[in-house]
Amino acid sequence: MKNDIPKVLKIAEVRDENPTVKTYVFRGCDLGAKPGQFVNLWMPRVDEKPFSVSYCDKDEFWLTIAAVGDFTRKLRDEFSVGDKLGVRGPYGKGYTIPEGKKIALLAGGYGAAPLYFVAQEAVKKGCTVEFIVGARNKDLLLYLDRIDQAEGMNLYIATDDGSSGEQGYNTQILERLIGDVDIVMTCGPEIMMKAAMDICEKAGKPIEVSIERYMKCGSGVCGNCCVDGLGVPVCTKGPVMLGSEARKIKGLAEFHRDNVGFKVVW
Ligand SMILES: Cc1cc2nc3c(=O)[nH]c(=O)nc-3n(C[C@H](O)[C@H](O)[C@H](O)COP(=O)(O)OP(=O)(O)OC[C@H]3O[C@@H](n4cnc5c(N)ncnc54)[C@H](O)[C@@H]3O)c2cc1C
């Protein structure tokens, strides 16, 4: 799909993932997205927002979206099968998927969805995948069955309250597995990714992280998603970056900037 002109697509299917997250399936479109890339979803007369691709083949792609604010709640409440939305993309740099390696994927929140796309491509390339998911409680977990049933993927779960899997942070599982994996890829809250970067640094293992900032154009032109310290737009230089690069972001896991550049503490 040519990326900068929004293509109007019908929602082909909507799947409930958990009480706040749904997966929207679009068919009849060869988006050509790689794991870790995102699209801008356009709701005419409302807004346009970035979402990671959680699955993509020649005929369909999925977006897995948490209802957190005006745009995403409107999507949840007013859009269903057959309704049209504009999609432009794919944008950004995705994860670097090696051949035949042992990969640990560390997911928090809706991060499990884009990492599931990574996992599928990694397995096709002969990798084994240790897929670690975490959430505050069992109701907020997602994609568990898909991961559990997939060939080549081992599922680990941690919840803050112990209602599913082991009690505590998913990073404690990563800490146990780190010696046996070649590379870590992560997507989720920045504080979790920062903790994973520290674990990897100590163990001397590479890590790729997905950095989210307030994005508008998707092409590196508007500058809204430029990060302090690096001064680069993460819509084109990211969202996926090496941990060693992400470390240079000033205020990593501490603050980000809103739609007009004001600091927002996480
Ligand atoms: C590269 C990237 C990939 C993303 N992938 C997903 C995904 O797969 N699933 C998902 O549920 N969410 C994803 N998001 C976050 C999603 O874009 C925001 O949750 C959404 O825009 C919220 O909009 P809202 O109007 O509903 O809420 P608002 O109340 O406007 O915002 C809630 C929070 O979402 C963030 N946000 C709002 N607008 C933007 C924007 N234009 N760009 C970036 N962040 C914004 C801000 O942190 C804000 O505080 C992604 C964001 C980025 C940058």
Image: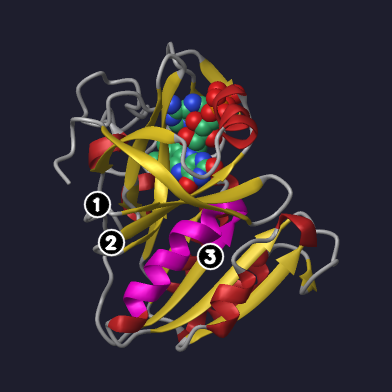
Q: Residue at x 48, y 69 (%)?
A: 105
Give coordinates of residue 94: x percent, y percent. 29, 55
- The answer for how far apart the CA atoms under marks 3 and 1 are is 26 Å
Q: Quadrant of residue 76?
A: top right
Q: Residue furthest front?
A: 82
Crowding at label 1, few (<14), some or many (≥20) Cα neighbours within 10 Å?
Answer: many
Q: Who comes first in sequence, dot 2 or dot 1?
A: 1
Asked if the residues shown at circle 3 and circle 1 are in contact, with their CB atoms under 8 angstroms apart, the answer is no
Q: Are marks 2 and 1 in contact (CB under 8 Å)?
A: no
**Mark closer to the chain start, 3 or 1:** 1
Q: Mark 2 and mark 3: span between their CA atoms?
A: 28 Å
Residue 90 percent location from the top left of the image: 25, 45
Q: CA distance from mark 2 to mark 1?
A: 8 Å
Is 109 magenta? The answer is yes
Chain part drawn in magenta: 106-122
Q: Name the residue that disc number 3 marks.
A: 106
Q: Amino acid at mark 2?
A: Asp
Disc number at residue 31?
1
- Res. 210 in view: no
Q: Overall secondary structure of the magenta stretch?
A: helix
Q: Nearer the viewer, mark 2 or mark 3?
A: 2
Q: Secondary structure at mark 3?
A: strand
Find residue 59 and name its label: 2
Model colouring:
secondary structure
Mark 1: secondary structure: loop
Q: Position of residue 254 (x, y in %)?
A: 57, 33
Which of the pair 235/139 is nearer the observer? 139
Label 3 environment density (alpha carbons within 10 Å; few <14, some 14–19, many ≥20): many
